[in-house]
Structure formats: structure tokens, C-alpha cells
Amino acid sequence: MVELRNWAGPIRIALTLLAFRHSVYSFGTSHNFPCSLTRCLSAITASETVGHPAHSYSTSISSLCTMPSVAHVKARCPLYPSSEIRRSPVPDDKLKWETRWADYKPVSYTAPSVLKNPSWADPDIGSFSPKFNSLDGSVDRRSLVGTYKVDQGKPLNPCGRTGLTGRGLLGRWGPNHAADPIVTRWKRDSAGQRVLNTHSKLPVLQFISIKRKDCGEWAIPGGMVDPGEVVTLTLQREFSEEALNSLKASPKEKGRLQERINLLFRSPGLQVYQGYVDDPRNTDNSWMETVAVNFHDETGDSVSTLPLRAGDDAGQVRWVDVDSAEPLYASHSQFLKTAAQERRAHW
């Protein structure tokens, strides 16, 4: 959800339960993302065994940030979101932690809402001893991009400096895990035929998008993985709450919504991304990571006909054409580009 709450869940464990088809941007590949997402991706692939003893598995992941050129642009936005705090500027050649920078003096900021110690947030370092790079009780402090460094008891952003220390608006020290359900359909004309883009001559996809209240940008209706929650449940829950406002539906309406949603989410999901997110809320010590999965309503008979109603954390909700010209929040454009390319749709 857009409101920050109950951040991390054992995503690595949960992924063993998923039957998602992987796109070209999944584990074991080297990516060519634009700099606004992660050109800190390296061509080095590392294999490691991860997971709880009961759910151990092997996976191959692309190492982030070994040789960054330009990384996390939005994570270095001058004005920190929902505040008057300005980051210390970080030039591209000073991103890497390995680059010595004696004069680096980042601003320290943790939002008042986080300092009130809500259930979804960690206490301050010093008042507790988190187990970084591991499953810490029900909170998964492992990163989807590999092992991150810890300096003086605080985790370091795997994509480098951001000009801000502390947690900002994020609840967890280290990775804050999210799940982004990308629900799509084909754009159709009055006769029910797919609409083709006039330039590319490819069919046009539409996705359900919400307008975030905090920044006014259009986004995928995703949210945070609750501690101990399986990612598949997060994807379905967040979509129901954000795009259909299921929390305020009547019992009869909830049943009808759930039937349609179950139909869609039982379909094969296409995992288009998992890893670090170029998010304006990121800091040197806290950052966003996500698993983005595309659920496609091929025939238009599952959720396409449901009335869209924005949840409490979203300003508006509507079907939006998938197009490279549409500006979106954080790294969401890259997720949609992958979904469009995999489905041979217009981008």
C-alpha cells in the first residue's frame, strides 16, 4: 500500500512457492536497464544457496552495483519526499562505497512517523540488534541483490551513496520488501477488437494504475510484504485494497470481487522484475526492493469489467495505456516495458 506499514517478509522463502514464469529480467541474467533504474547492474552473475533450512534452494542472481556508472537517480532527488529535508549532492563518480570520499557528510533524517515506533518500523540502531543479511525472526533482512555491507552497525545501500542517512520514510533498516502486481488487459475498440498503435502496429496493453497521494505520480498498485507473508498473498491483497477498495465493500460485493480476483490471480503470472528499486524514499541505510509480477486478463472476463475504486492510500485509479511516454513512479516504467515486450505489445 502507499501508506508505509509492516515492511518485510521472507521473500526468498516465498519465491520457492511461486509458479511465476520468469521474464528476461529475472535471476541469472545480465540486464541493460536505463540509468534511471539500475545501470549499476553488472554482468557478473553469482550463485548462492539461500533460504530457511526448511525452504533452501539455489538461485543465480545478477550482482548489483559492482561497477556502477549512473545509479539510482530518483534515490538522489534533492528534496526528500514529504519533507523539507535536502540531500547532500552525490556526483556519479562518488556513488560507490569503495570510492574514498573524506568530505562526504550526508544529512541524517528519519521521518517523525517512523520515530513514533509504529508496528511496521524498526527501533533505532543501538536499542536493538538486528541480524542483517539474514532472516531475523519474521523480518527478512536479506537483499534480493546479494549480501550488502554493514558499517558501524548500519547497513549500506547496495547501489551506493544517496546523500541521506537514517531511514527517511522507510520502516526497516536495510531492505524494505514490496510486491507489485501489474494487472493488464488488451485495449479494445467498440467491436471488441484489439487496438493497434498507429506507429508500432502492435496491440496496446492497458494496466490498472493508481495516483499516489504522497507525490501525485501514477504507479502500479503495490505495497509492502507483511512479516511472514507469502508474496502471492501480498500481490492479491494489495491489488484488492488499492485498486478495488475491497476494504469498504459489502460482504456480498466482497464475495463477487474475490471470485473475479481469484480467477485472475490463478492465471500464470509473469515475473518481470525482482531486486533493487530506484525509489525517492531510499537512503544510505534503508532502501526499497520489490518483486513485480504481471497478471494478464487475456480475454477480458476477469477483472476488466469490475468498477475501479481507489483505496484510502490512492487518490485515483484507472486503466492506463502502456506506453513509453507515460511518466510513472520510481522504476515502474521499466517493469511495464518488460511486460509489454514479453507479450509482444506496444511500448
Image (tube, rainbow, N blue to C red):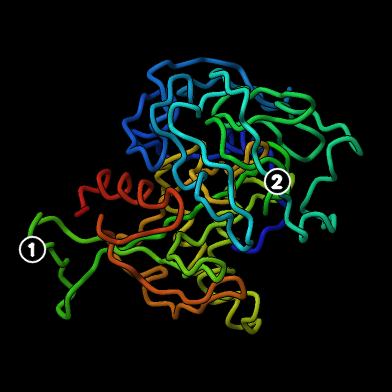
* Residue 86 placement (x, y as % from top left): 59, 52
Relative to 116, does residue 176 appear above or below in the rendering? above
Binning the other alpha carbons within 10 Å of mark 2 as few (below 14), some (14 to 19) or many (20 upward) gives: many
Q: How many labels does the image show?
A: 2
> Foreground residue, 252 or 82?
82
User: Looking at the rendered structure, which numbered label has been put on residue 98?
Assistant: none
Q: Element type at marker 1?
A: loop
Q: What residue type is labelled 1?
A: Thr
Q: Nearer the viewer, mark 2 or mark 1?
A: 2
Q: Which amino acid does label 2 sit on?
A: Arg
Left or right side of 126 for 205: left
- Residue at 25% from the left image edge and 45% from the top image edge: 341
- Residue at 40% from the left image edge and 36% from the top image edge: 22
Binning the other alpha carbons within 10 Å of mark 1 as few (below 14), some (14 to 19) or many (20 upward) gives: few
Q: Element type at marker 2?
A: strand
- Residue at 27% from the left image edge and 50% from the top image edge: 340
Residue denoted by label 1? 198
> Foreground residue, 225 or 14?
225
* Residue 106 placement (x, y as % from top left): 64, 38
